[in-house]
Structures are given as C-alpha cells and as structure tokens.
Image (spheres, helix red, strand yellow):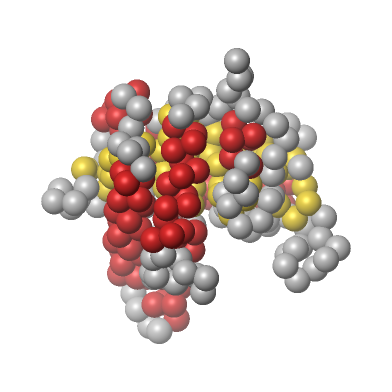
Amino acid sequence: METIKYHRILLKLSGEALGSSQGSGIDPDRAMAIAKRVKEVREMNVDVAIVIGAGNLWRGKQGIELGMDRATADYMGMLATVMNALALMDALESQDVVTRVQSAIEMRSVAEPYIRRRAIRHMEKGRVVIFGGGTGNPYFSTDTAAALRAMEIDADVVIKATKVDGVYDSDPKTNDGAVKFDHLSYIEALNRRVEVMDSTAISLCMENKLPILVLNLFDPTALRLALLGEKIGTLVDENP
C-alpha cells in the first residue's frame, strides 16, 4: 500500500498554466491536462484546493504602467482569477471530479462566497475547491492568497506548479549552466529573491512553518511522486 506524505494540498497555479502557447487566453486543452493531474491526486484520496492566478487574462502591472489606479487594476485581476477558476472547474467536472468555486469577492450567481468551514467540509466530502478572487483585497498577490488559504484549510503543503522542475540559481531557459536547488530554507529563498512566490507569501509560510514545494505540473509523474514522498522539485521549509 502506498504511503502518502501530504494528505491535503493547496495547489498554486499561474494563470499562464491555462493559457495558449503564447501564455494568453484560456486553452481548453491546457485546462484538461491540469484537470487530469488533479483527478489522479484525488484518486489517491488527497484533499485538493487550488488557487489560480490571472496572468493569461490580465496583469495589473500593465494597467498601472498605463496610468490606472493600483486598486482598480488589482480588482480587475481578482475578477480574472474567477474566470480562470470557472474554466478549470468545467474541465474538472468533465473528468467527473466534483468541484466548487469559492470567491473572496461575492458573485453568488457563479461562485460560492469564501467560507473557511464550508471549504473544509467540501474537501472532507471529496470535492476539489478552487479559490478565486485572491484575498479579496488589492495590493496582495495570488501567491499571498495561496499561502493564506493553505493555512486556513490546514493544508500540509503549498505546491507551486510551474513549467520548470524546481528552483534554479538563474533562468535555466537562458543559462545552460543554471544549478537546481533540491532544498532551500525560507531565509535562503528570501535572500536569494527566488521568483517562486513573492516575499509576502514566503514570509507568511515561514511564520507558520508551512512548506512550499515547487515542481513541474506538466511532468506527468512529478505531482504523484511528490505526494508519495519522492524527492521531486525544490522544497522550501524551515530546515537550513
């Protein structure tokens, strides 16, 4: 019988994970690929919650550069995360994975309002919960929303799903000599300014001793092996 290391996970996805090859829009095939990964995890009896970004639809920084008010730009991004959440819910339910979307910004006709105890109850019943709307507040990233929600639902780990197999000392796409880290402490991750999660999210995880695991979601075996305790990706935790 397989031994599961993490029994409840918060999966943090970038908006680009749903995007086309150019990283924009919503690609149904990408959404379906993610849904199949999540279904495999649910079949391992692991509770799954998801936070997804909105970079494929809207980037607040672009609006700010064009003179838009920061809070307005951030609220637009939060709304875009709900669009991504609904797209992923549709893909999951087409795979017979019962899913609920909860939004920090109330829009009851398309999503439940975020209620911590209800989210936990959904997972106890085997449902996947997707948290949209970020934290519900401007000036906070979806990375911070992921760390916050993970702690609220008592997740064992935040899994940051990327297109690379871990954290490197430089960009492996442009530097063939980039070195991959198997492990980093929170302090090392902050000092190195690794572009995995923002400093607020990492600090929040550090204060609450919540590990962060960075892996390649599009590797068909990475997520499953990580849940079984194999050394996959890069682990960020309190150990030096």
82 vs 191, left or right, is: left
How many circles with numbers are drawn on the protein? 0
Residue 209 visible, this angle: no
Q: Position of residue 85 (x, y in %)?
A: 34, 52
Tell me what residue is drawn at x 53 percent, y 39 percent.
158
220 vs 112, left or right, is: right
Q: Position of residue 48 (x, y in %)?
A: 43, 35
In this rendering, the answer to whether 78 lies above or below 124 is below
Tell me what residue is drawn at x 61 percent, y 57 percent.
163
Q: Residue 137 falls in which quadrant of the image?
A: bottom left
Quarter the C terminus occupies: top right
In this rendering, the answer to whether 6 lies above or below 147 is above
Q: Residue 203 falls in which quadrant of the image?
A: top right
Q: Position of residue 89 (x, y in %)?
A: 32, 48
Residue placed furthest toward the top: 1
Quarter the N terminus occupies: top right
Q: Position of residue 50 (x, y in %)?
A: 42, 43
11 vs 168, left or right, is: left
